[in-house]
Image (tube, rainbow, N blue to C red):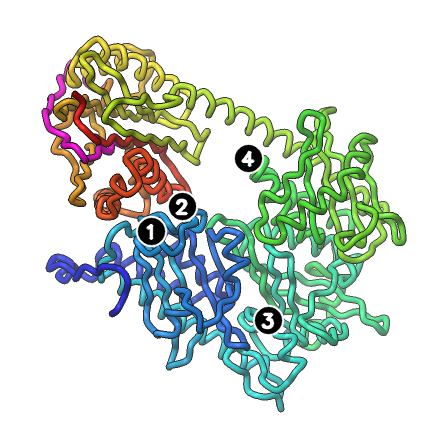
Amino acid sequence: MDLTSPWLPPSEDESRAPRSSPTARSAMRCVRLLLGCTTAAELLGTVLAEGPGWITGEGSALYLLDSAGMLRLTASHGLPDWVHERYGVIDPASELPAATALRLRRPYLLSPERTSVDYPNRNAGMGTGMVALIALPMIVDERPIGVLALALAHRGTVPRRDLDVLETLGDACAHRLAHLLDSARAGARPAGTAHPGPGGEAGTDGRSAALAHPMLSLAVRSAGHGAFERDLVTGETFWDATAYRVVDRPVPPDGPPTAPDLDGLVHPEDLPDVQAALAEALATGGPYRIEYRVPRRDGGVIRIEETGEVMLDVHRRPVRVAGLLADRDRAGAPAEEAAGGGGGGGAPAAGARSALLLALTRALSRAVTVRDVTTAVTDVARPAFGAASIVLDLVDEGRLLPVSHTVYGGPRRTELTRLADLSEGVMQHSLARSAPLFSEPATTRPGGGGPLTPASWAVLPLVASGRQVGSCLITFSTERVFGREDRTLYSAFAGILAQSLERARLYDTHHHRATELQRAMLPRTLPRLPGIASAARYLPSTEGMQIGGDWYDLLRLPDGRIGLVIGDVQGHNAEATAVMGQLRSGLRAYATDGHDPAATLARTSRLLSELDTDLFATCLYLTLDPADGTVRAARAGHPSPVRIAPDAAAVELDLPGGPPLGVDPGQPYHLTVGHLAVGETLLVYTDGLVEDREEDYDESVQRMLGGLELWARQAGPVRLGPAAALERLADLLTLNVTERRSRPDDVALLLLHRSSPVQ
């Protein structure tokens, strides 16, 4: 294969590896799950969640061919706004990776060298010099379906066995999509219409082609049922022509059609039930089923059964809803079930509204931070209310600052920001009066008119424990009258939202203070040393209080020597941070007194054993003489340092270790003497840099070493200069960590490069 990455043939050990290896088992399970997926978004999410851990997720996408023969971005994860805007639709004749893969009909791999040159924007999860990108063409029986693009954590070469796994996953996605498309065509094509084109739309029926949507066919289950899809990120909803006929609504003459407003479609008595059921489905994800009534244009009612599924992304956020609408009377439902909606309509409206508030309360109760609350409002409350947008402002030093746009991407972010600016005055007015405001038909609306002016709206002051927390604007795309029950419902929601925001802001404040405390215990800057370049990074854990006990230090020692310290205190809480501060101070004192690394660790271990704590710590301490490159080092249960040579060799130093600090205070530590030549670089780190729950630890270390060798081959210190090269390398190392779905451990690293001998 003519791929752009230097391939390594499988070693003898690899060729003899049993078929039940962890990678094979992971791929087999993923394939089985892929064959049960029902949408492109679910396929991509399954690959990222269930595939091998070296598929990073960030920067991955799935493109489908549409009726015009263009590659259209259908599902994605971790792509920045500019990618959606610039590469949302790709011409297969272009030179972009997805187009090239489809044209060549074979996998197209951009090696880390290529991604760093061709795609230098690090926000895309590429351009790292350590992350590869592969585009897998999805082709079934010579029929092109689309392209699956995945970002890989391979830093260096990509082994052949991993390519085989990727091709298998791509083939599974292709066959599943082909099956879904074929099934949809067979069930959705009326008699007498033309055969669908490559994208699944009819080729001669102009109206059908206009109403088609690239993903709509994936939701169709059987003939006679209307299909729909809601994009919860953009707010767009698409219906097919059958869906309009099921609810006795005219098909819009010009497509693509958007769905009727929920408030204007569902019978008023059933609306609270539907909103409550929808809120619960959005909060939990997965399949759902709702029954409700729709008024006919002739005065009767239609009993509708809505069956769908809420698709979640890898972060468990709802991103898409797809399903079917069926007329239950035509389907032969029992007559005794004819009453009511939302499962029968037996519950009174007051009980249904209570159920909706309960569902919203559950969603908000799981929110921890202000961003979590905003996400819950965006993902659950907005679609449950049938709202076009929700703008959430928080009181900050007497001013209202919008926060809703922070959980959106693409055009929605800009739209919400502009809407927040237009509505600022009415939101401040409502908060000052501590009373909600509701629009009425033909009344003045927020902003005084314009393209973003909503048809109707509600402004809710958010007050908790007598304190002004913020203000909330809920907008609707159609005019509506807010009755007494509606106003009571929104006022109750405002109280729940205000309490959640107050709690979340308190958490954010405590977390910010804890983080500031931890950062205050770490060096603000590294000392500038003659003949030496250095760089450091620290990332807190994303679990618990998001603080911990990792630390690093770069010390000036007597006689011109330099000391490097890296340590990791057990735990991720305030106690671990406090113990870390004491150990850092104690070790610094022992080191500057002139003790060698072994003696320094022994004294620090005794210090930890005398503290009132049950925690222990790993630590690595080494000294460097810049004049001759002599290195003296000792290790207390910590990962070994890595030496990176200019000839592209990256190896762990052979450094015998002792027990972690505080475990056995009487145990001495072994002192190792080595040498760091001019032009070589040392890396010391905590295990959070390489540790991944989805991958063997030793394999993670080997991947890191491969990436370091790649960095050295690119002659970074020579091309960029030592200081700039180390800063870039530190970014590359930590970028791979930030792309993970979670970070259960802290990450600290310290890089040191010997550029010249010191006289």
Q: Residue at x 26, y 15 (%)?
A: 587
Determine whether the residue tagged by mark 2 lies in a helix, strand or loop.
loop
Residue to which mark 2 is pinned: 739
* First along the sequence among labels 1 and 2: 1
The secondary structure that dominates the magenta segment is: loop
Residue 720 lies in the magenta-colored region: no
Binning the other alpha carbons within 10 Å of mark 3 as few (below 14), some (14 to 19) or many (20 upward) gives many
Q: Residue at x 31, y 24 (%)?
A: 552
Q: Which mark is residue 131?
A: 1
Where does the magenta region start and end?
663-684
On-image quarter of the C terminus: top left
The reply to whether residue 696 is visible in this rendering is no
- Looking at the rendering, which quadrant does residue 32 occupy? bottom left
- Looking at the rendering, which quadrant does residue 712 occupy? top left
Cα–Cα span, label 3 and label 2: 31 Å
Q: Which amino acid type corresponds to the residue marked 1 in the rendered image?
A: Val
Binning the other alpha carbons within 10 Å of mark 4 as few (below 14), some (14 to 19) or many (20 upward) gives some
Q: Which amino acid type corresponds to the residue marked 3 in the rendered image?
A: His
- Disc 1 to disc 2: CB gap under 8 Å: yes
Q: Which mark is residue 638?
A: none
* First along the sequence among labels 4 and 1: 1
